[in-house]
Amino acid sequence: MRLFIGSGNAIKVNDWRCYLPDWEVLSYEDLGLEKIEVEEGMSSLEENAVCKALAWAKSSGELTLSDDTGFFINALGGLPGVSVKRWGGRFEKEMDRAEFYSYLRRQVEGFDDLSCYFESAYAVASPEGIAEVFSDRMEGELDRGLLEKDIPEGSPLGVLFRAYGMDRTWRDMSAEERRRADSRIVTRVKKIVESFGRDCGQK
């Protein structure tokens, strides 16, 4: 099977290559495409994921997987929410990573409860404009000790997030551990892609 990852994030592409080792997983660079930016709304992860997948599928001519993820801190009433780097729409422009983590520290300072969750929407779209989307949630907590340390430039939120039942943060997990943790997502994506493949005669 062949699947294009509609994202400019190399980490996501590498994750899916880990999750689908027997598939041909393609990036925009593999196809010599320009990176595209799809404007995201602040109300629906599903709509954002579908918009991305459709735009990338049209650009690449390939069956495409895209996603959108929100981050929700329970003690803050669900902020930052869908528009993570704009902190739920409080800011007109995205903060850079250093600003984001500084603001995050200030917002959770003094809270004993650092429980939170990632909610993600995954959309598979064809070049013909057909898309299917589903959502998934991973619950856990922020690592207070790591939050108080200097965070390397460019680090994703996964460096601070420990899912319930895991003894290390997401980015400290091995490829196999991440594959097991996301197995339900991978299974769902594979079924959708294989369904698209049967419809269009892909082998």
Image (cartoon, rainbow, N blue to C red):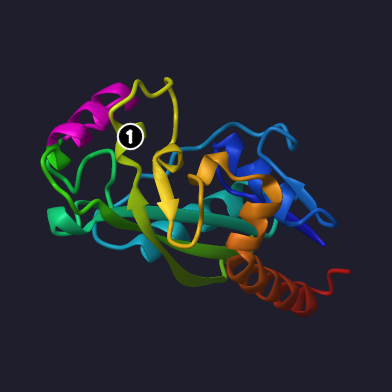
Quadrant placement of the N terminus: bottom right
Which residue lies at the image location 19% right of the left edge and 52% below the top edge?
A: 79
Which residue lies at the image location 51% right of the left edge and 46% below the top edge?
A: 168
Residue 128, can we see it? no
- 182 relative position to 114: left or right: right
Which residue lies at the image location 48% right of the left edge and 62% below the top edge?
A: 165
Which residue lies at the image location 20% right of the left edge and 54% below the top edge?
A: 113
Is residue 100 a member of the stretch shown in magenta? yes
Relative vertical location of residue 92 with respect to residue 63 in this rendering, above or below: above
Q: Position of residue 70 (x, y in %)?
A: 34, 54
Identify residue for label 1: 145
Q: Quadrant of residue 105?
A: top left
Quadrant placement of the C terminus: bottom right
- 187 relative position to 121: left or right: right
Q: Position of residue 124 (x, y in %)?
A: 59, 65
Residue 56, can we see it? yes
Relative vertical location of residue 91 with respect to residue 65 in this rendering, above or below: above
Relative vertical location of residue 72 with respect to residue 200 in this rendering, above or below: above
Q: Which residues are magenta?
A: 92-106
> For the image shown, how many numbered marks are present on the structure?
1
Q: Position of residue 22 (x, y in %)?
A: 85, 57
Q: Position of residue 98 (x, y in %)?
A: 30, 22
Q: Secondary structure at mark 1?
A: helix
Closer to the camera in the image, 145 or 89: 145
**Given the current orientation, which residue lies at the most extreme right position?**
203
Name the magenta segment's main secondary structure: helix
- 110 relative position to 87: left or right: left
The kind of residue on which mark 1 rests is Gly
